[in-house]
Image: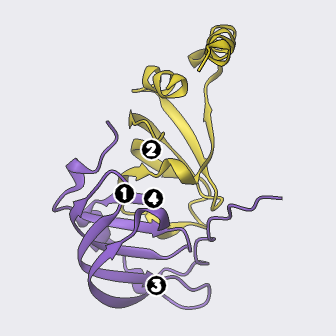
Chain colours: A yellow, B purple
Amino acid sequence: MLFYSFFNTLIGHSVTVELKNDLTISGKLVSVDQFLNIKLNDIKVLDQQKYPHMDSVKSCFIRGSVVRYVSLSKDLVDTALLQDATRREAQQPK
Amino acid sequence: MANLQDYIDQHISVITNDGRVIIGVLKGYDQATNIILEHSVERIFRPTEGVESSELGLHIIRGDNIAVVGQIDVEEDENIDWSLVQANPILPVNYNIK
């Protein structure tokens, strides 16, 4: 649940999502769920010339299972805090 | 929650894991992203020809096979002459990355 909570803190900010089909979509993060499905608004597809398929799409839902990377601005993430939190979660007995 | 409720009864564009683009009206969905599409049409993209539309009718698409669900701006969509758009199809999702 940690990364779900983390993504929740990014809501409203711009992120870029690279998918496993090499499509890269950037937009404003609207919502995330426990599967890390992502909803974006005001989307832009990187390399629009190559991918006109989504030209009339303004907002989209991306299935968590097809996400390869989510890139975000450096100042949106406190890496030290996240590192601590992941370590703490890993240490918790099941 | 990132669900599809706001897309219900709207025109949507589904990109499947095998790279197809299917347009239709969203009639239903569930937690697994299985979706029901009414009046669905496949847009077939080719590098040397304009887009071909293939009528599919009512379709249920299994969530496993869905990559992206996009909400179509109908007005903007009508302004695009898809018969002039040429592009390679979207690549299939590849789960076996080297």
The residue indicated by pointer 2 is A37
Name the residue that disc number 3 marks: B84
Position of A79 with respect to B87 (left or right) is right
Which of the pair B94/A28 is nearer the observer? B94
Provide the chain ID for the residue under circle 3: B
Which of A32 and A2 lies nearest the eye of the viewer?
A: A2
Q: State which quadrant residue B58 falls in.
A: bottom left
C-alpha separation, residue under disc 4 versus residue under disc 1:
10 Å
Whether tag 1 and tag 2 are in contact, CB under 8 A, the answer is: yes
Amino acid at dot 3: Leu
At mark 3, the secondary structure is helix
Tell which tag, 1 or 3, sits nearer the viewer: 1
Q: Position of residue B79 (x, y in %)?
A: 30, 71
Mark 1 in CB contact with mark 3 (< 8 angstroms):
no
Disc 1, SS: loop
Can you tell which of label 2 and label 4 is closer to the viewer?
A: 2
* Distance CA(mark 2)–CA(mark 4): 10 Å
Task: Compute the Cα span from label 3 to label 2.
Answer: 33 Å
Assign the N terminus of chain B to one quadrant of the image. Answer: top left
Name the residue nearer the viewer: B72 or B40: B40
Q: Secondary structure under badge 4?
A: strand
Q: Which residue is mark 1?
A: B33
The residue type indicated by label 2 comes to: Asn
Q: Position of residue A74 (x, y in %)?
A: 65, 20
Q: Position of residue B6 (x, y in %)?
A: 21, 48
Locate residue A4, reporting x and y percent: 48, 28
Q: Which residue is mark 4?
A: B68
User: What quarter of the picture does the C terminus of chain B occupy?
Assistant: bottom right
The reply to whether label 1 and label 3 mark residues of one chain is yes
